[in-house]
Image: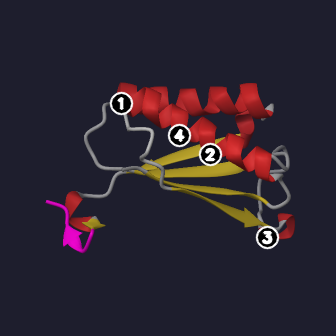
Amino acid sequence: MPLVRIDMIKGKSDEYKQTLFDCVHEGLMESIGIEDWDRFQRIVEIDRKDFETPAEKTDDFMIIEITMFKGRTKEQKKSLIEGITSKLVDRLKIQPTDVFIVINEPDNENWGLGGNQRS
C-alpha cells in the first residue's frame, strides 16, 4: 500500500498526468510487486512562482515521494527509482535530472489503516 505524492509545476494536461500516474504505478508493480488495484497516488500542482528549483531544472521537474511499509531491499528500491525514471523519460520525454524521488518508510506504529494501528 504505497502512498505516492507528486509535486509538479501546474499546467500539464490530464493525459500527461494520467501517464505520470501509470509510469509510477507500473514502476511500483514491477519493483516491489504491488497489485494493480493498489493505487494511492496524488498530484499536487504548484504555480511556477511557488516552486523553487535549481536554475538547471526545467518546468517538467517533479518531486515524487513514496511512503511505504518497511521491508523492501536496497535492490528493490534501486529498481523502483530507476524504473519510474526510465518510464517517465520514455513516455513523457522528461529529462532524468528533472525526476527527484524520495522513499519514506515509517515504522508500523505510524500507520493507521481502517481505524487500526498497524502492528
Q: Tag 2, which secondary structure? A: helix
> Closest to the observer: 87 or 99?
87
- The earlier-in-sequence mark between 3 and 1 is 3
Residue lying at 55% horizontally and 27% vertically, measured from the top left: 83
- The earlier-in-sequence mark between 2 and 3 is 2
Q: How crowded is mark 1: few (under 14 residues within 10 Å), some or many (20 or more)?
A: few
* Residue on which the image places disc 2: 21
Is residue 111 among what the camera can see?
yes
- Position of 110 compared to 78: left or right? left
Q: Nearer the viewer, mark 4 or mark 1?
A: 4
Total marks placed: 4
**How far is disc 4 from disc 3 in space, using C-alphas?**
27 Å
**How far is disc 4 from disc 2 in space, using C-alphas?**
6 Å
**How far is disc 1 from disc 2 in space, using C-alphas?**
23 Å
Type of amino acid under label 3: Asp
* Residue on which the image places disc 4: 25
Circle 4/circle 2 CB separation < 8 Å: yes
Q: Give the range drawn in magenta.
A: 114-119
Type of amino acid under label 2: Phe
Circle 4/circle 1 CB separation < 8 Å: no
Q: Tag 1, which secondary structure? A: helix
Q: In which quarter of the image is the C terminus?
A: bottom left
Type of amino acid under label 1: Lys
Q: How crowded is mark 4: few (under 14 residues within 10 Å), some or many (20 or more)?
A: many
- The earlier-in-sequence mark between 1 and 2 is 2
Q: Residues within 10 Å of mark 3 (few under 14, many from 20)?
A: few
* Residue 99: image location, x then y, percent: 67, 41
Q: Tag 3, which secondary structure? A: helix
* Residue on which the image places disc 1: 74
Image quadrant where residue 72 sits: top left
